[in-house]
Image (spheres, rainbow, N blue to C red):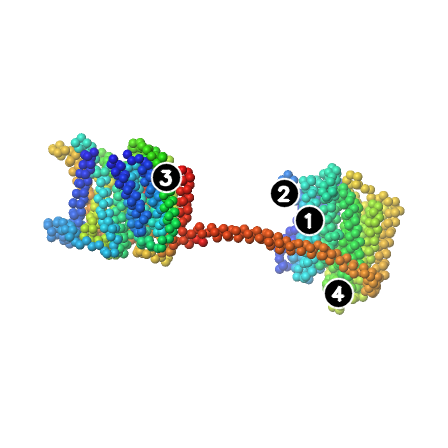
Amino acid sequence: MLFDLGATAVKLGIFLGILLGAIAPVMVWVERRGSALIQDRPGPNRLGPWGLLQPAADALKFFFKEDVTPSLADRPLYLAAPVLAVLPALTTFVFIPFGPTVEVAGRAVPLVVSDASAGVLLFLAIASLGVYSLVIAGYASNNKYSLIGGLRASAQLISYELAMTLAVVAVLIPVGSFRLTEVVAYQRELWTPFGMWNVVPQLVGFFIFMVAAFAETNRLPFDLPEAESELIAGFHTEYSAMRFAAFFMSEYIAMTTLSALAATLFFGGWSFFGLVEGAARTVAGWFGPFWLWMGLFGLGTLLLKTVCFLGLFVWVRWTFPRFRYDQLMRLGWKVLLPLALANVIVVAAATLAGWL
Amino acid sequence: MTDLLWLIPLLPFLGAALNGALGPRAPKGLVTAVGVGVPGLALVLALGILWDYGTRLAPAPFEQVAYAWTAGPSSIDVAFLLDPLSAVMLFVVTFVGFWIHVYSVGYMGHEGGYQRYFAYLNLFMGAMLLLVLGANYLVMFVGWEGVGLCSYLLIGFYYDQKIPPEAGRKAFIVNRIGDFAFLVGMFALFATYGTLRYTEIFAAVAAAPERATAPYAFGLSLAAFVALCFFIGATGKSAQIPLHVWLPDAMAGPTPVSALIHAATMVTAGVYIVVRTNVLYQLAPGVSLLVAAVGAATAIFAATIGLAQDDIKKVLAYSTVSQLGYMFLAAGLGAYTAAIFHLGTHAFFKALLFLGSGSVIHAMAGEQDMRRMGGLKKALPITYWTFLLAALAIAGIPPLAGFFSKDEILAAAAGEGHWLLYAVGLATAGLTAFYMFRAVYMTFGGRFRGTEEQRRHLHESPPSMAVPLVVLAVGSVVAGWFGIPQVLAFGADVNWLHHWLEPVIAGVGDTAHAEHHLPLAAEWGLVLLAVAVAVGGILLARRIYGGDRALEGERRVVSALGPAHPVLVHKYWVDEWYDRLIVRPLALIAYGFWKVVDGWIIDGALHLTASVTELTGDLGRFSTTGNVRNYLLYFFLGVVVLLGWIAL
Amino acid sequence: MVPIAWYLLLAALLFAIGTVGALTRRNGITIFLSIELMLNSVNLTLVSYSRLLDDRTGQLVVFFVLAVAAAEAAVGLALFIAVYRHRRTIDLDRVNLLRW
Amino acid sequence: MIEVAIFAIFAALALASALVVVLHRNPVYSTMSLVVTLISLAVLFVLLGAPFIAALQVLIYTGAIVVLFLFVVMLLNIGREEIGEQRGLVQKGAAVVGAGALLVIVGLSYMEGYGGAELAPLDEELVSLTGLAAELFGRYLLTFELVGLLLLVAVIAATVLAARERPAVPTVGRDLATAATLEPGEDGLVSERPDDEGDLAGSAGVAGGAG
């Protein structure tokens, strides 16, 4: 009992540490340097080597900026919005596995915070709660740009959630379970003795998932809720200081979790064609317990894949132009959704045929 | 050939439909072709069928079912019956009818509504044929009503004038009174025998007379009851007392119509139906006697009126009524053959008379008052001679048609020993001769008394009118030769019609009576007496009206009659009495019903329900506030109550 | 172990609250929300029974209720949008043309 | 023990937020507190051994339906309810009384029904998803299809109803009109879908309803 609680606490701690301590600052840096790289300019390079300390400076600035609350704002909601933004983003990570179930002091410990039977469902459910923060922020700011941004956000998120969910469904059909651990396990036995990544049979689904992910995170080319050229900064126009930072971070965290999910669903999650276990076993042969190395290597692999996706996010952001709103809606409803449905049907048929 | 029987009634209906569809703009030639061609076809067809039927050795009644009208246990079909009786009627109707159609072409030539006229006339032909050919009372009744309708339409043909439409309405309503009784009779028959087919009913009656003679209603036996009802109907159709009032007014219609409908065919429908139902009449001696009495009364009554009329058509109308009286007299006496015989002969010479008068009126440009005529002999010779012939025929001068038929009736009266009836008949014969020749002399004799332009307008009728006159004249001569009594044939049995109608007039039970049981001498005496009376009437008329003495003769008569004359002129004020005794009270009652029953009770009830509804609505509407939450509340509270009722 | 009656009572309470809301509020949206509340209390009841009777049907019915609620929300809100366009309000006391 | 605690907490939360839903004058607050109610109910569902239903609850209700409400609230920019003169006091009183009566009736019947009913230990079979899916696409397949049809109809109806007839002046940004008209359709369209997908993807497909 206590042990389990402790294990869960440890796992949670690890994740929170990674997300808040590592991913967010690093992403800030990556974003700014990456944009500079793409736009062929130096970017932040004064603080520390290659400006590596820039994020810290940003954080400091956020801490010390004045926290303005518009006088006509709906205060309680205005204050609640940023929190609502961060919470779901952080929570969803608990369903991402970073290793198999291992022996720790004679007890079986799954290397995942929560292995609920409705895992993916809960992931999506909680992720879908993120909408509220944007809408509430937009409304509470009592500012028409913010309101429009919030409205856009709600419409856009709901629209693309469909496509994304259906893509996930297509992945889950052959697996036959909502547990992400099962998804990973499935990919480890698919076709070859070393397993095969879902991206191969599910290429279409992967494409849909990624596009939807971009929209879900309000990233370019789908960042209309905060399109600066039209809405200043959309729903978080009025926010400043740490509350603004909260939105900022929540966006990065959402990106990260989605990337992790993508990695887990389509790229074998923590596994790498059996190499990870192998490496863990060999290293454990020299010293240290297996479960430790297993966890570390699994987490490492997962992070590696995640970071690749994050890079992709940045790359796309600075490369693509922004959609117009009606184009966005048309794409979501008239292209992605039918495509996803067709994909689901095809996959279901293939599963019945026994190919997957 | 007889299989085509159903075509005969159908053809005129088709003609009527066609002419009706053509519309007033239709070319006259086409209308004429249809209007006259159709009855012509019917005539040819009828002659063919009659020949085919008559030349059979034993002409059994031929019945043909056009189609089943009503289904069920007691089905009533649209069926046609061809038996000796209907054969005679068929011939008369088609023959006279056709020639009157031809006549109409000339007579109506200048009138408006030419096509409408022929449509009506064809329709009448169809209905009349339906009447005489129907194999059961219902089909017959359809025809019966049909002819009534046509009569109404044709009397009111000049709907833009005042009198004709009223006359039409009068005819229709009076007929309806009779029809009502007729319907009751039909119901009684149907209720008793479960069928309306002639053959079945008569067979049933003949098989079990006691059933028909059993007391039925109002202290009458079934036979008596039905016979009475039918007779009332007949009085309506055939203008017998007390329902005779419509016929004289019916003269408001075009003259050919008067000839065809109100002299030759339709008005004889009553006689026809009585004869057709003779089986029942034979079982109801009382009613038969009533029929005879009414007939006789009508005969003399109408004849007397005829004395005082100045309108030529009125004279003919009353003579028609009186002749019809003769027929009923015969029928009532059981001399059905005589009735039909007289019906046939009368059809010819009365039609001829009317057509002649029509030709006169035509020549006089619509003038109908005999006092303004006179001296037309030279102007319209054909008309004169034919008219004279017909007058002789109706007066009963041998060897013309009227003589034989009338004599047979009188003989029957005498033979039955009803001397009163005989006397009445004889007197009527004399009166008939008198007023007919009064008409002849006033019209054709003496000098012309009309205006100048009438004189200039005088002209003999066109052939289309002349030819029918001649044909019918021939008819009025020979028609009588089909029923020459044994006596007059010096014992030779040449009474063809008598034998022909034998199967239809089969005596039932003991009521079968031998006709001639008078000594031969008496027979001859009666015949000579009748002829003498007729001649006397003629001579008297000549004495009074002959030559140029028409008008002062009239004056002499008037003074001679004294106070009686106005009575006759005003037809015994029958119309006035009816108006006082029936029409006005009826109108009063109707007014009361309209004001009280309809106005207060019925409408009142209606308004009451309406206002109650409105009141409840006014009270209830406040529950519909239009506010959804209130409705929701009602609903919810209801649920709570229900739930409490269930749970606790 | 929580006695099932508690769940049921909780559901009943929620239902009552929802009812009062639906019957007393004037704002269409709020009424709609109250109705959703009632639906959910029913869901809770259903799930409780499926637990009590150890029968899955209750959960399935909840599933259908969810679907139907989705449809209801879609149509209902569309209606509100339409009403608002014409009357510039969704105060149901003002949308009462259908009256005497 | 823990279970009782969790139940107590979330039941209280649900009740409180429900009261806010009903009583608050601002629709936005009502909506948000409805979200709270729903989530706490979801937790109770988990306690009752229906995690799948709980997930769906969050996914469909909070993730889609209530967002829809919020969206409409904002699109129509419905502010605080006009504090008009206190109309319909009778209505209010009757409503409260009726609700109280209902509560008493139901409560009494529950109490005498399951006052001390002890629950059988939760068996995994009840919780398992596959069983649920099997039954959903077995006994209730027809119902499922019908619900799909219903949703399809709802989509069409909503689109037609909300479609803007010219000239139309939405209170908030015109560029949202498309969204406004599309919006209501959305969850309909998707949760109506699984019936094309056939059997085992079904339950997952319903998750698609989350959209």
Q: Amino acid at mark 4?
A: Leu
* Chain containing mark 1: B
Of mark 1 and mark 2, the one earlier in the sequence is 2
Find the distance from the CA under tag 1 to the CA under tag 2.
22 Å
Foreground mark, 3 or 2, reads 3
Q: Could you confirm whether marks 1 and 3 are on the same chain?
A: no
Residue occupied by mark 1? B180
Residue occupied by mark 2? B70
Q: Amino acid at mark 1?
A: Phe
Residue B312 seen in render:
no
Residue A126 picture quarter: top left
Of mark 4 and mark 1, the one earlier in the sequence is 1
Q: Amino acid at mark 2?
A: Thr
Using a 10 Å C-alpha cutoff, classify the residue at mark 2 as few (fewer than 14 neighbours), some (14 to 19) or many (20 or more).
Answer: few
Find the distance from the CA under tag 3 to the CA under tag 2.
67 Å
Residue A59 seen in render:
yes
Q: Is residue D173 above or below residue A18?
A: below
Residue occupied by mark 3? D106
Of mark 4 and mark 2, the one earlier in the sequence is 2
